[in-house]
Image: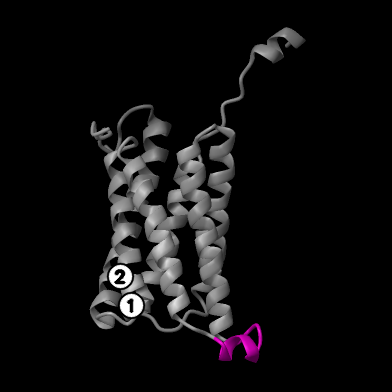
Amino acid sequence: MGNKDIKNTQIVNADPSALGLFGLAMVTLVASSVKLGLTSGVSLVIPWVIFLGGFAQLFAAINDSKRNNIFGTTAFGGFAFFWFAIGLTWLIKAGVLGESLLTSIDVTQLGFAYIGYFIFSFYMTIGATKTNKVLFIIFVFIDFLFIGLSLSAFKILPDISYKFAAYSELLIAIFSFYGSAAVVLNTHFGKTFLPVGKPFKIF
């Protein structure tokens, strides 16, 4: 190609949401297994938190930014850093970062963090009405997850709220797997292989 052709050619980046949703699906599936009592401990959850919850969603955020997608950038980026923080939190609670940090833990601080993320998730849920119904449902269950985690951290009906968070997290995983598959297969086949639902016409 000549210089003129190169200037007129636009490089279209692949949609990173498939990888981002897969990362979200994997980390919530593994994390929910602990909350549901199907597994115990977080030692082998932490790698999935860091790489799938953190790096996969951060990768999606960075590449959504290149596509000028502020919603995808903010959503994937915000939740990537959430999972990085959760991974570090678990390392602190396990005593990996020293005895002084372990002995000064106040779990209610996590409650305030969860409230902050509920606020974030809530206004992102409003934004999700303009995307598709699958993504909107994922955000609704993320809202439920943070409600459950917040109540549990503040010891408000801890058993019920923790189970509420657990089932919400499992549903996030299921719908995120579906959403990821839809992005891949619909794009790959060039048609609606898996329907995701049209955006709501609310705003």
Res. 75 mark: none
Magenta span covers which residues? 95-104
Question: Callout 1: helix, strand or loop?
Answer: helix
Q: Is residue 81 above or below residue 131?
A: below
Residue 168 image offset from top left, x and y in percent:
28, 64
Question: Callout 2: helix, strand or loop?
Answer: helix
* Residue, disc 2: 148
| Residue 166 in view, yes or no | yes
Q: Quadrant of residue 89 in the image? A: bottom right
Q: Which one is nearer the viewer's eye here, 150 or 37?
A: 150
Q: What amino acid is found at the position of numbered circle 2 in the picture?
A: Gly
The answer to whether the residues at label 2 and label 1 have Cβ atoms under 8 Å apart is: yes
Q: Quadrant of residue 55 in the image? A: bottom right
C-alpha separation, residue under disc 2 versus residue under disc 1: 6 Å
* Residue, disc 1: 152
Q: Quadrant of the C terminus?
A: top left
